[in-house]
Image (cartoon, helix red, strand yellow):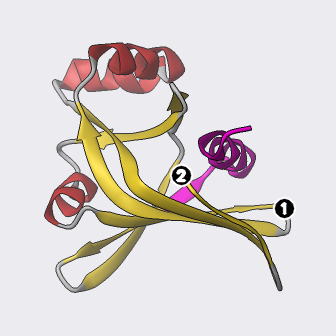
Amino acid sequence: MSNAAKVNDFLNKAEVFYFLTTDGDQPKGRPFGFHLLADDRLYFGCGTFKDVYRQLTENPKVEILALAGGEFLRYDGTIKEVKDEALLEKTRQAMPDVMDLYDKNGWTMALFYLENGRAEIRGLFEQKEAFEV
């Protein structure tokens, strides 16, 4: 199993995970649920009209935190936005209701991955695994 697939599997187990960003000098965290593994790369998305998108463009360094069972995942890196119609179509297939809402309101979904990513899966008291993604 690839490292990207390990992170994807953990996020599937967690169902909800948290994107940690900054807004100026203020830390911000928000729940996310959407992630897409395609061609061994893990993609995320958010609306370009949201504060989180502005924060990601102002400071593209992020950390993702997820909890599943007695373990947690930390995954950090630098956001790299992609414009790819095939990925957008896969996103539409993965969450048609959300994408219909975006279409009805004229909103745009930004897709991105973490460049130079590093992940670690830990138990409460010990590190289980650390790897580059």
Query: What segment carries the magenta color?
Result: 1-18
Quadrant position of the N terminus in the picture: top right
Q: From where the camera sits, is residue 65 visible?
A: no
Disc 2 marks which amino acid?
Answer: Val
Specify whether 127 is left or right of 46.
Answer: right
Is residue 52 shown in magenta? no
86 or 100, which is in the foreground? 86
Residue 111 position in % (x across, y down): 32, 36
58 or 131, which is in the foreground? 131
Q: From where the camera sits, is residue 40 visible?
A: yes
Q: Residue at x 22, y 27 (%)?
A: 83
Examine the residues drawn in magenta and state their main secondary structure: helix
81 or 23, which is in the foreground? 81
- Closer to the observer: label 2 or label 1? 2
Disc 1 marks which amino acid?
Answer: Gly
Tell me the SS state at disc 1: loop
With respect to residue 92, does 21 lie above or below?
Answer: below
Q: Residue at x 33, y 24 (%)?
A: 101
**Residue identified by numbered label 1:** 69
Query: Crowding near pointer 2: few (<14 within 10 Å), some, many (20+)?
Result: many
With respect to residue 9, does 58 lie above or below?
Answer: below
**Residue identified by numbered label 2:** 133
Residue 103 position in % (x across, y down): 25, 18
What label sits on residue 113 in the rendered view? none
Count the marks: how many? 2
- CB contact under 8 Å: marks 2 and 1: no
Tell me the SS state at disc 2: loop
Residue 58 position in % (x across, y down): 14, 64
Q: Residue at x 61, y 52 (%)?
A: 16
